[in-house]
Amino acid sequence: MDYLITEGYPSAAEKFASEANIRPRADFSCIQERVQIRDSIHRGDLQAAIEFINELNPELLDTDKKLHFSLLRLQLVELIRQSFASSDATLVGRAIEFAQNNLAPYAPLEQQFKNDLERAMALLIVPKDSWTKAASSSSSGQSTSQVQADFGALAELVDPSLRRKVAKDVNEAILQSQDQRREANIRYLVRARAWAEGLAREKKVDLPEFLSLGLDADAHPKDSHNGHHGDTEMTENGAEDGAGGGDADLARYTNITS
């Protein structure tokens, strides 16, 4: 229930509550607002997402510069994508104008802003054929290897995973602004489990080569890495996401001595 509410799945949460005969503490109508924002980002409609965010919390993007910049940069990427998918030659100019008016003011504030803006603008020099092949790969669900070959270090900007990452960051920021936990407990516990196992193996503790959580009876040990069994894939940014900076907190879940 906690996961469904935090991640923004109101219908599933409501059905779960009904079948489990429990009364949820959350207001499902509030969850729906986060769902609207997430769906807008996932489909590349960043303008709508920003408007929804401002309606929900007018101060959020003003106080969180990094979050606002990431939304605007993704919006720039979508504008550039549209310019290559359309025969309208004015779209390139609109993308450049958007960058000048909305993103350029961030460049003097932090070097990372400047670097990220420059990388996004570099998409304008990618050949149109590469954009066409990228769109084809995305719609057919094919491997991203061709996209990586065409876009090189810029591939991450056109990969759908960037939309998911930004949506995740926005969801967590909204939850925090509402004095709620930024993520579901199960995500934290999965990272804690992976961290504890990794530490145990590092200290040569006698453990089976494969430790299953019993979440997928059909999976084979060879599909796992160091016994993680893909559990940590529940995070959007990979198995080790956020684990490095939380060792002190995670340590309380294990009795392994340093």
Image (cartoon, rainbow, N blue to C red):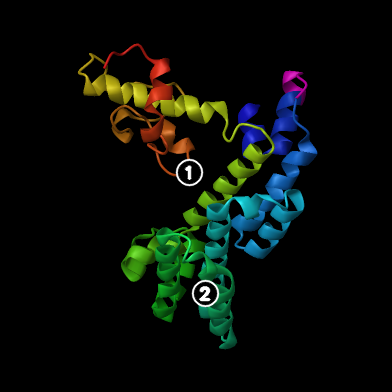
| 46 up-or-down from 85: above or below | above
The residue under label 2 is 80
Residue at image location 39% in from the left, 80% down from the top: 127
Residue segment shown in magenta: 18-24
Q: Residue at the top extreme?
A: 255
Query: Can residue 210 be seen at all in this image of the molecule?
Result: no
Quick check: 139 left or right of 220?
A: right
| 139 up-or-down from 90: above or below | above
- Residue 22 colored in magenta in the image: yes
Q: Residue at the left extreme?
A: 204
Residue 212 falls in which quadrant of the image? top left
Rendered location of residue 115, percent (x, y):
39, 64
Query: Can residue 155 be seen at all in this image of the molecule?
Result: yes
Residue 43 falls in which quadrant of the image? bottom right
The residue under label 1 is 236
Number of numbered labels in the structure image? 2
Quick check: 8 left or right of 132?
A: right
Residue at image location 42% in from the left, 33% down from the top: 232
User: Regarding mark 1 in the picture, which secondary structure is present there?
Assistant: loop
Q: Amino acid at mark 1?
A: Glu
Q: Amino acid at mark 2?
A: Ile
C-alpha gap between disc 1 and disc 2: 24 Å
Number of other residues with Cα within 10 Å of mark 1, as a class: few under 14, some 14 to 19, many 20 or more: some
Q: Earlier in the sequence, mark 1 or mark 2?
A: 2
Rendered location of residue 41, percent (x, y):
61, 56
